[in-house]
Image (tube, rainbow, N blue to C red):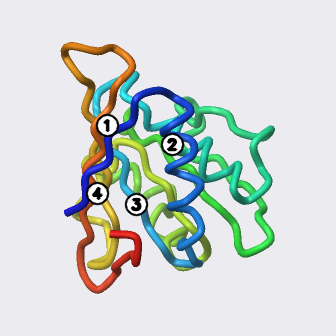
Amino acid sequence: MYKFISKCEQDTIIFAKKFAKQLNKKDIVVLSGELGSGKTKFVQGILSYFGLENEISSPTFTIVNEYNATLCPIYHFDVYRLADIDEFYAMGGEEYFENGICLIEWGEIIQESLPSDYIKITFNKNNSNDEYRELLIESFGNKCFNMF
């Protein structure tokens, strides 16, 4: 497990850009944490690395936004509003896993549908400083990142 302390939104974005350098097609990143903890800012940093910084929008109402990056498509999920995992299967959610990079906010909701290899980042707010965030990065399966 790797821990990163972000002292502001810009720290989170810069860290996400560094993280994005290692992403490839079929990589899955689960983003967990309470509302306002920095998950979407992290996605913004990843998209920025791929030259898509002006295209980000929250997929809360659409469940998934698709971005066309040079390397491969990037799929940004927000599965918070799904009633259950069956909704994810009904929309063909698992088919995205093979076709691009998947960034899944609230991914613990669909955990049983995830392949064995994925990265999970848990975002925790700091009780004594509203700007600080603790990001805990865990690797599951064989996927491993050099920076950790």
> Counting residues from the N terminus, which is met first, the one under dot 1 or under dot 4?
1
Q: Residue at x 52, y 51 (%)?
A: 16
| Inter-mark Cα distance, 2 to 4 | 13 Å
| Inter-mark Cα distance, 2 to 1 | 25 Å
Q: Residue at x 19, y 63 (%)?
A: 1
Residue beneath disc 1:
83
Which quadrant would residue 37 be assigned to in this image? Answer: top left
Which quadrant would residue 35 be assigned to in this image? Answer: top left
> Is 54 left or right of 126, judged from the image as shown?
right
Which element carries disc 3, helix, strand or loop? helix
Q: Which percent across, then down, holds residue 24?
A: 57, 77
CA neighbours of label 3 inside 10 A, class few (<14), some (14 to 19), many (20+): few
> Is 52 left or right of 18, judged from the image as shown?
right
Residue beneath disc 3:
89
Q: Which mark is residue 8?
A: none
Q: Are marks 2 and 1 in contact (CB under 8 Å)?
A: no
Q: Residue at x 73, y 55 (%)?
A: 67
Q: Looking at numbered disc 3 in the image, what kind of residue is underneath it?
A: Tyr
Q: Are marks 3 and 2 in contact (CB under 8 Å)?
A: no
